[in-house]
Image (cartoon, rainbow, N blue to C red):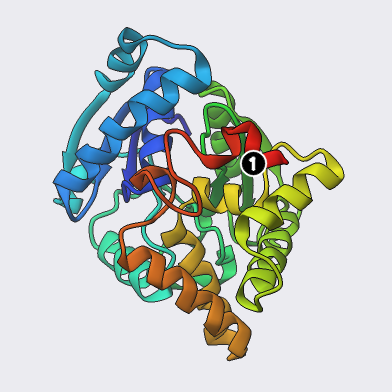
Amino acid sequence: MEIKNVVIAGAGVLGSQIAFQAARFGYQVKIWNRHVDRAEKRLANIKGQFMKDMDKTAEDYENAMDNIVEVSNDLPSMVSDADLVIEAVSESVEIKKAFFEELNEALPDHTIVASNSSTFMPSQLVKFTNYPERFLHMHYANHIWLHNVTEIVGTPETSKDVIDAVVKFTRSIDMVPIVLKKENPGYVMNALLIPLLNAAQSLWARGVADPHTIDKDWMLSNGSPMGPFMILDVVGLRTAYEIVENQYQKTKDPLAKKIGDNLKAMIDEGHTGVESGQGFYHYPNPEYKDPEFWK
């Protein structure tokens, strides 16, 4: 199994970054998104962050963009010659189900399909596909060119050849493959991170302390480079809302409902995190860069 042509389905924060990272290393990349203009805007937004994170030039960015050969909402056309499709649509089981059912009708017999889902496990999504031996999860962190880990896990039906192929692909785009022995909610990274973010949001929702105070306490107390609300701004408040909404639907916990309502109010005002210029902090000059913040 050789991967040459890559399709990224969903050009949100991570989908656009995955596409860009593959393009950086010479893959011919297509992006499927229901709203083409939004996908193109996401790709443009990558430029400044990539150059800052990696100390790269505008020419480096443009060279990578040359390998993104098409952005379209025509799924059958996009996947007709795909060797690998990475799904990065919204974290909603209904949206993912609809996407995979549409993909089933168009997918070539050899194509590997991976989900980048943060909150669902392979066993929850594979039932929407008709190619279980070619299905697995490849999970990425935000700013993937900097935080270059890919968590990889399939189901008992996933072919070993498929795992081997995506490990090879992962290394070829300068990512470190972390192959899990079995599926786990949140993989490894989010299994450790989400309890921290939940605890911080619980403190906020219960009125114990405001987000800036919580971040400051956490960072000063243990030397962490980022506080939980800084992390939420980077992840994006839409993704944070989807995660807590999924938790609420499972548990009907009123505290999860309160956290979700708080996030939804910010999102409705257009405050979705770093991408929009405002979340819990204001960007590009967030409050924590002011020495007075730390007093």
Give the x, y percent position of residue 251. 62, 88
- Residue lying at 40% horizontally and 20% vertically, measured from the top left: 24
**Vertical order, 13 against 122 (above or below):** above
Instruction: Locate residue 47 relative to residue 79 in the image: left or right.
Output: right
Give the total of numbered labels. 1
Q: Quadrant of residue 22?
A: top left
The answer to whether residue 51 is above or below residue 79 is: above
In which quadrant will I find the C terminus?
Answer: top right
* Observer-nearest of 11 and 260: 260
In the drawing, does residue 90 fall left or right of residue 78?
Answer: right
Which amino acid lies under the numbered mark 1 shown in the image of this protein?
A: Phe
* SS under mark 1: helix
Q: Residues within 10 Å of mark 1 (few under 14, many from 20)?
A: few
Residue 170 image position (x, y, % from top left):
56, 31
State the residue in front, 134 or 193: 193
Residue at 55%, 67% in the rendered image:
120
Closer to the camera, 226 or 194?
A: 226
Q: Position of residue 182 (x, y in %)?
A: 73, 58
Residue 241 horizontal/vertical position (percent): 47, 68
**Which residue lies at the image location 60% right of the left edge and 43% below the top edge?**
163
Above or below 9: residue 165? above
Q: Is residue 102 visible?
A: yes
- To which quarter of the image does residue 102 belong? bottom left
**Of the pair 26 and 271, the residue shown nearer to us:** 271
Question: Would you say residue 110 is visible in this rendering?
Answer: no
Looking at the image, residue 220 sits to the left or right of residue 285; the answer is: right
Disc 1 marks which residue? 293
